[in-house]
Image: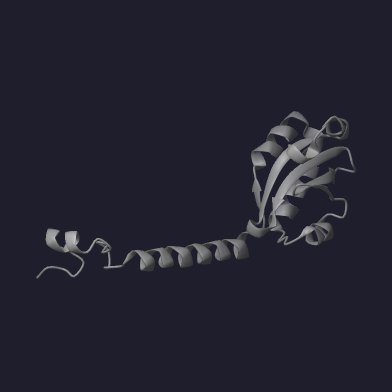
């Protein structure tokens, strides 16, 4: 007896929409993929908080500037645990954060000794680190909206 999912050459040539796995047509397959993706992203959001890209930027900076390590690690842990949906949510976690436009936000780190510029995508819970430096290095940035 031939399994249901096995088709012959004649069946394959006459029915171009048939897949070998489970006899799904194209729309059923893509609907399944879409539902799986929505479920996975929702599950990831529930369990993870904010996703920070990339911690290695912070590590590289505080390796060269060890006095900033504790403050940057504190920022990282608080941000990773947060579930920000808007700028007001960020303000509840860090009251010194400022919006500089183009989805970029500036954090004062260690009593304003350091500045951290991030790009935040609230819809997908991602935080992209764009700049870490001293306050004087930050002041030298000419176009903050495009870094």
Whether residue 8 is visible to the viewer of this picture, yes or no, is no
**Can residue 34 be seen from the camera position used here?**
yes
Residue 90, horizontal then vertical, whole percent: 79, 57
Q: Quadrant of the C terminus?
A: top right
Is 65 drawn above or below residue 119 in the view shown? above
Look at 38% across and 66% down and name the residue there.
27
Check the image and report above or below for 142 versus 76: above
Q: Residue at x 74, y 38 (%)?
A: 146
* Residue at 62%, 59% in the rendered image: 48
Q: Residue at x 17, y 64 (%)?
A: 6
The answer to which of 39 and 72 lies nearer the viewer is 39
Along the line of sight, the residue nearer the viewer: 47 or 38: 38
The N terminus - image quarter: bottom left
Residue placed furthest toward the front? 14
Instruction: Single out the residue that lies furthest toward the right.
Output: 111
Q: Position of residue 24 (x, y in %)?
A: 30, 67
Q: How is the image coloured?
A: one colour
- Foreground: 133 or 8? 8
Q: Quadrant of residue 53?
A: top right
Within the image, what quadrant is residue 143 found in?
top right
x, y percent for residue 94: 83, 54
Horizontal and vertical percent for residue 18? 26, 64
């Amino acid at each position: 007896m031939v399994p249901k999912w096995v088709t012959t050459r004649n069946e394959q040539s006459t029915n171009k929409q048939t897949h070998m796995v489970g006899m799904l047509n194209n729309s059923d397959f893509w609907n399944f993929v879409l539902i799986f993706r929505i479920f996975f992203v929702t599950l990831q959001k529930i369990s993870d908080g904010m996703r920070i890209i990339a911690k290695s930027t912070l590590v590289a900076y505080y390796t060269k500037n060890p006095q900033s390590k504790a403050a940057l690690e504190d920022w990282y842990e608080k941000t990773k645990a947060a579930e920000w949906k808007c700028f007001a949510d960020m303000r509840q976690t860090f009251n010194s954060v400022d919006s500089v436009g183009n989805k970029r936000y500036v954090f004062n780190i260690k009593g304003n000794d350091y500045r951290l510029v991030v790009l935040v995508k609230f819809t997908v819970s991602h935080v992209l680190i764009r700049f870490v430096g001293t306050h004087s290095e930050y002041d030298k940035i000419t176009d903050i909206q495009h870094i």
